Image: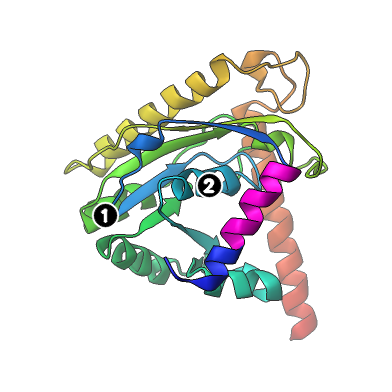
């Protein structure tokens, strides 16, 4: 557990949460293995849902290796932390290298965090899953640990201003029982989604959801986009990103 940069980050983040941040309730931490590799599959509603996930693992005396988009290496402080914490950069145009690194880390006994939805869910419901989490767990021969973080999207999510400091919102983090991959990627993916759906509903059950709030899913009386509406927003965002990239390429040509 040396890794001085990681240690400083652990102390800083846990201290900031205690002093300034949200009230996080953890359940099922015993489901995080004390030793050995595992894929930690986390839902994705916020830019900061990694914080409760990482602290949950830290409370078990483990460290979580996140797969982070390689563009973040352009930000000097983030690049320093990524390298110091041995995170796994992902080039979205060629993700095979990151996938191979993740499988190797799992075989070496590490815990690797994966967001099966890939990007933030604007509806705050579970989006369609990518199969990377399942495939790497099968290839490395390790279990998958479903985890749900609920409430972090109230502090910082897409399309809404961030509210990070002196914000004592409640956050729930629930860790489910380990799932062993089967011979079928489809069956394993379905089992993972079922487990995460059940945990999400459990997290929401005792959580207050004021009617009309932007962070409350539509089915719970809020004003968040439906899954279908959120998909259209995602597509528009991708189209705009592609347009901007094309303009940059033209200027540089």
| Quadrant in the picture for the C terminus | bottom right
Name the residue carrying label 1.
36
Q: Residue at the location (45% across, 47% down)?
A: 57
Quadrant of the image occupied by residue 5:
bottom right
Name the residue carrying label 2.
55
Q: Is residue 141 left or right of residue 136?
A: left
Q: Which residue ends up furthest to the bottom in the rendered image? A: 253
Q: Residue at the location (72% across, 28% down)?
A: 215
Q: Is residue 143 left or right of residue 173?
A: left
Percent coordinates x, y for residue 28 in the rendering: 40, 31
Percent coordinates x, y for residue 25 in the rendering: 56, 30
Q: Residue at the location (62% across, 49% down)?
A: 14
Q: Secondary structure at mark 1?
A: loop
User: Is residue 19 one of those drawn in magenta?
Assistant: yes
* Helix, strand or loop for the magenta stretch, by majority: helix
Q: Is residue 101 left or right of residue 207?
A: left
Q: CA distance from mark 1 to mark 2?
A: 18 Å
Quadrant of the image occupied by residue 17:
top right
Residue 84 visible in the displayed image = yes
Q: Residue at the location (76% across, 84% down)?
A: 252
Relative to 75, residue 161 above or below: above
Q: Are marks 1 and 2 in contact (CB under 8 Å)?
A: no
Q: Which mark is residue 206?
A: none
Q: Is residue 177 left or right of residue 235?
A: left
Relative to 160, residue 5 above or below: below
| Quadrant in the picture for the N terminus | bottom left
Q: Name the N-terminal-most of marks 1 and 2.
A: 1
Q: Secondary structure at mark 2?
A: helix
Residue 158 visible in the displayed image = no
Q: Which residues are magenta?
A: 9-20
């Amino acid at each position: 557990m040396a890794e001085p940069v990681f240690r400083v980050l652990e102390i800083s983040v846990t201290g900031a949460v205690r002093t300034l941040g949200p009230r996080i309730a953890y359940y099922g931490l015993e489901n995080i293995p004390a030793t050995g590799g595992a894929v930690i599959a986390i839902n994705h509603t916020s830019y900061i849902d990694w914080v409760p996930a990482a602290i949950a693992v830290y409370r078990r005396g483990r460290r979580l290796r996140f797969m982070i988009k390689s563009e973040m290496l352009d930000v000097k402080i983030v690049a320093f932390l990524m390298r110091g914490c041995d995170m796994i950069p992902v080039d979205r145009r060629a993700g095979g290298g990151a996938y191979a690194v993740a499988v190797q880390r799992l075989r070496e006994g590490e815990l690797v965090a994966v967001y099966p939805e890939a990007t933030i869910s604007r509806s705050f419901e579970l989006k369609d899953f990518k199969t990377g989490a399942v495939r790497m767990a099968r290839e490395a021969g390790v279990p998958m640990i479903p985890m749900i973080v609920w409430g972090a999207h109230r502090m910082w999510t897409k399309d809404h201003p961030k509210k990070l400091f002196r914000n004592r919102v409640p956050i729930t983090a629930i860790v489910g029982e380990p799932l062993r991959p089967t011979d079928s990627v489809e069956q394993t993916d379905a089992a993972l989604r079922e487990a995460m759906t059940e945990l999400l509903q459990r997290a929401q059950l005792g959580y207050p959801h004021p009617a009309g709030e932007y962070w409350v899913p539509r089915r719970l009386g809020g004003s968040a986009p439906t899954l279908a509406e959120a998909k259209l927003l995602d597509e528009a965002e991708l189209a705009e990103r592609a347009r901007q990239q094309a303009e940059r390429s033209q200027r540089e040509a």
